[in-house]
């Protein structure tokens, strides 16, 4: 692999990490181009969508090469985005070698983030405090703690076996509604609506909505519209799961 190909693969790898970690389209393109120009590429172009990226560079010999990467899995890891951003900015001000940047990107990509226990506890607390924020009582708070824990445990298990996101969100909405109705019926909780709202906040695609708006404002219309549609489908999935349980509960 010659120098130009290594630069191309390093830039694409940096873009992939940011995109898979929930970064905005403009940030991915900006980072890839910054890396290419930092290594003295004559010209660089990139095009990014939420499910893939394309990048091409032209070297000093006017040789143009292109690379396409397909993104099949996305999550939220703002720490990875920050680390890749810092690395690309450091690269423009310091004389870092290609091998060093490649090794550093591999280390960033290997970071697994928070373990499942921390995620489960955090999700449980988030659901509980969202319920309080929306006007729930302390009894509703403890019910939401339990529901948030259940939703996160099941979501992690289903994600590990690559279950469709639409089904996971529908199931999450259904579980939140079912347990809220049951606990209120048993007299443990008081306000099923507050419990349901607080619990399903774990599933609301806040980052996706934010990135959709930012991409659209930045002029990346394809990415902005596709992210907005993704957010709408997540909302529909949550509504479908909750609606089915409410309908069945009222019927039987």
Image: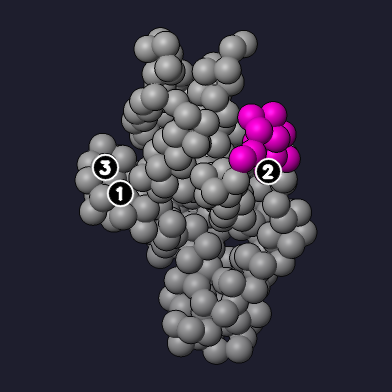
**Frontmost residue, 210 versus 175:** 210
Q: Where in the figure is residue 60, as x and y percent of width and height?
A: 42, 17
Is residue 245 part of the magenta span, yes or no?
no
Counting residues from the N terminus, which is met first, the one under dot 1 or under dot 2?
Answer: 2
Secondary structure found at label 3: loop
Where on the picture, by quarter, is residue 242?
Answer: bottom left
User: Where does the magenta region start and end?
Assistant: 95-109
Q: Main secondary structure of the magenta part?
A: helix
Q: Nearer the viewer, residue 51 or 93?
A: 93
Please tell me whether residue 209 is drawn above or below residue 54 in the rendered image: below
Q: Residues within 10 Å of mark 2 (few under 14, many from 20)?
A: some
Residue nearer the viewer, 165 or 173: 165
Q: Which residue sits at x=44%, y=82%?
A: 134
Place of residue 46 in the rendered image (x, y in percent of width and height, measured from the top left) = 36, 30
Q: Which residue is mark 1?
A: 215
Secondary structure of residue under mark 1: helix
Kindly report the distance in space between the C-alpha atoms of the residues bearing marks 2 and 3.
Answer: 27 Å
Q: Is residue 48 left or right of residue 249?
A: left
Which one is nearer the viewer's eye here, 211 or 195? 211
């Amino acid at each position: 692999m010659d120098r130009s190909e290594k630069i191309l693969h390093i830039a694409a790898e940096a873009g992939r990490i940011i995109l898979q970690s929930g970064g905005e389209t403009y940030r991915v393109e900006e980072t890839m181009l910054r890396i290419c120009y930092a290594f003295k590429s004559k010209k660089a172009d990139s095009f990014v969508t939420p499910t893939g990226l394309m990048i091409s560079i032209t070297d000093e010999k006017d040789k143009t090469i292109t690379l396409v990467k397909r993104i099949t899995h996305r999550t939220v890891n703002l720490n990875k985005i920050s680390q890749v951003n810092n690395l690309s900015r450091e690269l423009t001000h310091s004389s870092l070698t290609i091998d060093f940047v490649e090794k550093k990107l591999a280390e960033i990509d290997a970071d697994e983030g928070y373990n499942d226990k921390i995620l489960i506890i955090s999700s449980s607390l988030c659901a509980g405090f969202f319920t309080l924020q929306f006007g729930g009582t302390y009894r509703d708070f403890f019910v939401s703690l339990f529901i948030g824990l259940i939703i996160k445990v099941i979501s992690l298990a289903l994600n590990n076996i690559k279950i469709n996101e639409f089904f996971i969100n529908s199931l999450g909405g259904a579980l939140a509604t079912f347990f809220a109705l049951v606990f209120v019926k048993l007299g443990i909780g008081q306000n099923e609506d507050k419990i349901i709202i607080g619990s399903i906040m774990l599933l609301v695609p806040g980052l996706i909505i934010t990135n959709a708006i930012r991409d659209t404002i930045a002029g990346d219309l394809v990415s902005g519209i596709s992210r907005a549609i993704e957010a709408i489908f997540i909302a529909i999935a949550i509504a479908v799961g909750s609606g089915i349980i409410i309908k069945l509960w009222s019927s039987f």
